[in-house]
Amino acid sequence: MTARLIGDPVRRKEDRRFLTGKGHYTDDINRAGQVYAVFVRSPHAHAEIKSINTKRAAGAPGIVAVYTGADLVKAGIGTLPCGWGVKNKDGSPMAEPPHPVLASGKVRHVGDPVAVVIAESKAAAEEAAERVDVTYKELPSVTAVDAAVKPGAPQLYDAVKGNLCYDWHIGDKAAADAAFAKAAHVTKLDIVNNRLVPNAMEPRAYIGDYDRATGEHTLFTTCQNPHAIRLLMGAFVLHVPEHKLRVVAPDVGGGFGSKIYHYAEEAAVTWAAAQLGRPVKWTAERSESFLSDAHGRDHVTHAELALDLSGKFLGLRVSTLANLGGYLSTFAAAVPTYLYATLLAGTYTTPAIYAEVKGVFTNTVPVDAYRGAGRPEASYLLERLVDKAANEIQIDPAELRRKNFIPKDAYPYQTPVALAYDSGDYFATLDMALKAADYAGFAKRRDDAKRHGKLRGIGLATYIEACGVAPSAVAGALGARAGLYEVAAVRVNPTGSVTVLTGTHSHGQGHETTFAQVVAERLGIPIDQVDVVHGDTAKTPFGMGTYGSRSLPVGGSALVKALDKVEAKGKKIAAHLLEAAEADIEFKDGKFTVAGTDKSKSFGEVALAAYIPHNYPLETLEPGLDETAYYDPKNFTFPSGAHVAEVEIDRDTGVVELLKFTAADDFGRIVNPMIVEGQVHGGLAQGIGQALFEECRYDPESGQLVTGSFMDYRMPRAGDLPSFAVATHATLCTHNPLGVKGCGEAGAIGAPGAVMNAVLNALSTVGVSDLQMPATPERVWRAINDSKAAA
Amino acid sequence: MYNFEYHKAKTIADASAMITQKSEAKLVAGGMTLIPTLKLRLAKPSDLVDLNGLPELKGIKREGSAVVIGAMTRHVEVAESAEVQKAIPALAHLASHIGDPAVRNRGTLGGSISNNDPVADYPAAVVALNATVITNKRKIAADAFFKGMFETALEPGEIVTAVSFPMPEKAAYMKFPNPASRYAIVGVFVAKHKDGVRVAVTGAGPCVFRQKDMEAALAKNFSADAIKSIAQKQDGLNGDIHASPEYRAHLVGVMARRAVAAAG
Ligand SMILES: Cc1cc2nc3c(=O)[nH]c(=O)nc-3n(C[C@H](O)[C@H](O)[C@H](O)COP(=O)(O)OP(=O)(O)OC[C@H]3O[C@@H](n4cnc5c(N)ncnc54)[C@H](O)[C@@H]3O)c2cc1C
């Protein structure tokens, strides 16, 4: 019998396929008779479309079809829906201007698609796309979120005053104001959360197909949530009922959120395939990904923290401008509100919190959830603020945090911003991280560095995230327009092997291994007897997909519920076979045993009996052993942790070198520590990327994307990163059967604060007290110079 | 990419004839610059004339007190050459820091200097080492070769066949890479020759240039201290999202001092 499986670093079942180049991605799929789509995109940030002349394109060699926004409108095609509605302070709904599949009337960002050209080859389609003549009347544009809310700023929509999608708030303003009135000290911070481009390794790719015989549409797509895409595209855009629409998300090479959303190109190829009776394929060029994948972050915030004499936090006030881009993407409205401001209590007991967030349209690519989604913004803001307060009142940053942590015995803990934390131990993770990072020995390292002419700094950040999205009723009350439960089916095959069908989707997370571990341990069968299937609406029952670190907390819980049902039915069958009472049957290590006897039936024998029911209680029990469960979580899960970064700065050039990074995280129970470590590493790389390197920049005059390729957009690379020291400390989630919390986003949430606090700690010795991300060489060099000049 | 005719040149003369006859024809060497330009549909050559397959353009040899490197020699070959490492270690070091492994495995010396990207590394070595560019028609002195941004002394039909680098007494190259592309934001090549010091700066301006104030100071006293008070003027320097002219000017000083220190 297999030993302990949950908690073992089982090698990833999917790696043989991926490492030998046998992964099967959307672009690897080719259908008979396939044609190729190329999108004609706006070269302008903001312009009126005066005319589109497709005549020259229609005559190009190899051309199959050209469609514009007008063709889609004529065909009754709907607009891309937003999956979350946020309310204004006064209770009125947010502004929700339509997001057409192909722009009509106006373009609102560089890269906005205005036409699709379909041809016999990709080269022919590219050639023909150049022959689509679009006449634009350029309009003034605005790309920066703070500029877009100024009076006189260019307006994206006639019906949206001041580019304001919503003006939302949370918390108790009067209580917060009262806290500030009695504060001994107030720390203020203006902070920018830099805009990021997700850059999954695999670019987006879609194939639309249509079967004239059955009337069934198929979309192969690089998405994280095939059922959600089927729902959104079928119901709102193409008006195709679910039973005639199949969505397949095969192997997908990374998503980080950017592949959650329903994109225009998906709808366009699916619709065009039906028009033409031929499969239509589109694969993004990398430069197209920069111009059309939803971007992340992009906040400008003013925040204030009120403290009493002893350093206890009394109140927090936050005012944020969040850039939503030119259109509302699928989850755009929720990210800077319910996924951000609800996290502003962090790991602290701050009793009064008030936050207001303005969601703002600008002439940029739509902004939506990107690894962490709202929570990195909240955590970065808080941790910078806490460090600044610590400096101002001259108290060790670790000490100030401990003073304000939610006590270990305070759970469940209700925050002033809607969430109820179920478990955690922030003292333990902070202690672990500080010890592993040798926080106590830092002063010596700083002095050594000084002798070599370097500025050395150490910085820490704690974080909390709300994961395992989400209790459907709660989410619904907050504006979600879908349920957020998860689904799993455990199909026991007649000879005892198991096929698991899940509604979550793995695009790098290793579900095929982790979920199989859960099944193998529970059923007492070898892990190679378990296969996990996901990503095809024709195979898996239903599901909401993978994001928000939800797959194991929500999908894994559905899996456990389905396993409960398998076990319960197995007991009934075993009781019959063993001629015992059902209540006397125990299931352990893959065997059904009559309690207190050596009479038993193996799991395989019971499975066989279920499918060959010759000796079977057919009057009371259906044959078969195939159970499905839906699981709606009772609460969010709350992973938390402490991260410590240590850096050295070259004063002459401003180059920051990250020397050490230590993470101590609480993810609840760990099913596969190797996979968890990998997830943490990846998240840290992205968080460090945000702190030190990555910044999506638009030219403020022209609205052009300046960082439109890897020649200018600086991704983190292996050589930039030290060997991470990562560890975990588990307090179990109290409300899901596995006790798991989720680990996919933590790295990206904790790292920016830790790294920037380290940079500022190093720079504090030369009088620098503020710096925005990313801490690029010139920015750091300037900060040093400016403080020299000021001194 | 637009359609073009592809030709694999059989001789240098053959290649030269083809690019002279067809006005829209282009040579392709490593393709590291040209192919991306084609893929982005930014260039529309009628013909591509491939220099790969001409053995006479490849290789590294010592000729007296110079190292002669064929135009089609890849960056990785220069970086790993025992000959170059021994004769002019600074040149091997420079080649080893160009781009990333993929770029170094394809990109060539001839392609790099013919393209004369203002942020390329090799132009600094060619100028500081006072190298001679050898073409199918003539020999061109370093100072006369690089004319301006993406501009060289090459005439239509002219092909770089090799570059002859005289061995300096000592030399070093210090590069501040563009964090995204790894091209030079500022690269300073300092070389001490029998008859004087040459300091070539790439990345900072529209074209590689010599920092003559530093050259004069270093000729008198070859030490980092000697150039401490020489400030590079920021007028006319490049500015982009990664580095302003002011920052580049500052980096010229830092990289020059570090190069002098490294040269020993
Ligand atoms: C991601 C990336 C990073 C890079 N980083 C750096 C860097 O850090 N430093 C750096 O210096 N460079 C860098 N490069 C440039 C690269 O190293 C090559 O030197 C450059 O692309 C040109 O060389 P090539 O052999 O690829 O030339 P090609 O792209 O084939 O040709 C370039 C041009 O030169 C012409 N040409 C080629 N050979 C000859 C010849 N013998 N005679 C006359 N004309 C000729 C061609 O017609 C063409 O116009 C980078 C490139 C990339 C893609």
Image (cartoon, coloured by chain):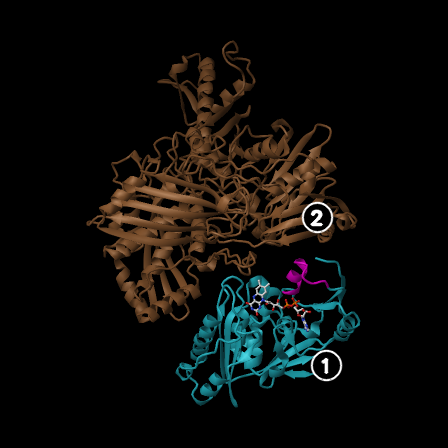
Residue B85 appears in view? no
Quadrant of residue A466 in the image? top left
Quadrant assignment for ligand 1: bottom right
The chain letter of the brown chain reads A
Q: Residue B137: which disc?
A: 1
Q: Is residue B42 within the magenta segment?
A: yes
Q: Is residue A324 within the magenta segment?
A: no
Give the percent coordinates (x, y) of residue A402: 25, 47
Check the rendered structure and report the hue given to chain B.
cyan
Mark 1–mark 2 CB contact (< 8 Å): no
Q: For this rendering, which residue is in front, A736 or A343? A: A343
Q: Is mark 2 on a helix, strand or loop?
A: strand
**Residue at horizontal 45%, vertical 30%?**
A476
Q: Would you name the residue on which mark 2 appears?
A: A52
The three-letter amino acid code for the residue at tag 2 is Ile
Residue A753 placement, left or right of A255: left
Q: Is mark 1 within 8 Å of ligand 1?
A: no
The residue stretch that appears in magenta:
B33-44
Q: Is mark 1 on a helix, strand or loop?
A: loop
Distance from label 1 to label 2 (Cα)? 51 Å
Label 1 is found on which chain of the structure? B
Q: In which quarter of the image is the N terminus of chain B?
A: bottom right
Give the number of marks. Answer: 2
Quadrant of residue A571 in the image? top left
Q: For this rendering, which residue is in front, A6 or A714? A: A714
Label 2 is found on which chain of the structure? A
Crowding near the residue tagged with mark 2, few <14, some 14–19, many ≥20 C-alpha atoms within 10 Å:
some
Residue that sits furthest to the left in the current view: A309
Q: For this rendering, which residue is in front, A517 or A297? A: A297
Give the percent coordinates (x, y) of residue B155: 71, 78
Residue A757 appears in view? yes
